[in-house]
Amino acid sequence: MKKYSGNCYPGCRPDPCRPSRPCCPPRPIGPTGATGPTGATGATGVTGSTGATGATGATGATGPAGPAGATGATGPAGAAGPAGPTGATGPTGPTGVLEPGQFLFNVIGEAGSATIGLGENLIFESSTLDITVTAGSAIVTIEDPNPTGPTGPIGPTGPTGLTGADGADGATGPTGPTGPTGADGATGPTGPTGPTGADGATGPTGPTGPTGADGA
């Protein structure tokens, strides 16, 4: 193989004088070498990002019906419906029969009470009232032979009468006990000077006076 010198190898650079040609002629291609042994398997690459979600599949067939659920609790009673129309009047029943002594009614008075049965008599008695019974109608009339109405209400008070004449003076009552002594009154004014009294008796002679001075 031809060897090149200068600036051809290594670091081939273009010739400034011939810019269209390389500085070195191209190398001749030799025969293909034998295939080398297979290299070791490289490390597993990084997991790629998740692909886009696929389209929704077709709806599946409807499944079989599930078992019936338990019976729910009984709901509250509904409101009462409107009253129905009045039914037709039934046939009249057979006439009833009362037995003797069967209860008919009560009799109640101000004092005591009793019952009246079939065939028993109700007797009215009074020592102050007239009682008349009319046959065939069971009408009892009770009248007071001496009716006196109830006492009327008390009338309003009449006007006040005239004042009567004064009565005679009554006897003088006994003298009451002496009251306590009153406080001393103020001193009265000085009275006038009384007349001059009579001369008094001559008094005893007084002692002799001192001797007078000698005369000139």
Image (cartoon, grey):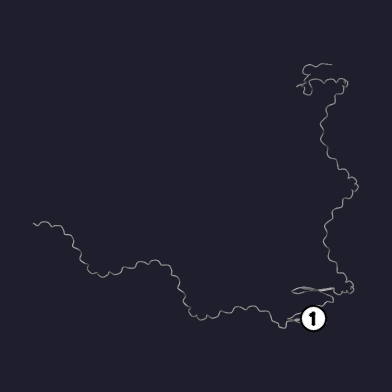
Please state the total of marks drawn on the protein image: 1
Farthest front residue?
A: 204
* Quadrant including the N terminus: top right
Q: Is residue 12 left or right of residue 149?
A: right
Q: Which of the two residues, 151 or 60, is positioned nearer the viewer here?
A: 151
In the rendered image, which quarter is residue 108 located in? bottom right
Q: Position of residue 169 (x, y in %)?
A: 48, 79
Compared to residue 12, the image places residue 142 above or below, namely below
Q: Which residue is mark 1?
A: 139
SS class, disc 1: strand
* Image position of 160 (left or right of 118): left
Q: Can you give x and y, in whole percent of width and height, for residue 158 in the image?
A: 59, 79
Instruction: Return the x and y of residue 89 as percentages of the image width and height.
Output: 88, 72
Q: Residue furthest left?
A: 216
The reply, left or right, for residue 61 in relation to residue 179 is right
User: Which of 178/157 is in front?
Assistant: 178
Q: Quadrant of the C terminus?
A: bottom left
Closer to the camera, 142 or 93? 142
Task: Tell me: residue 216, above or below residue 23.
Answer: below
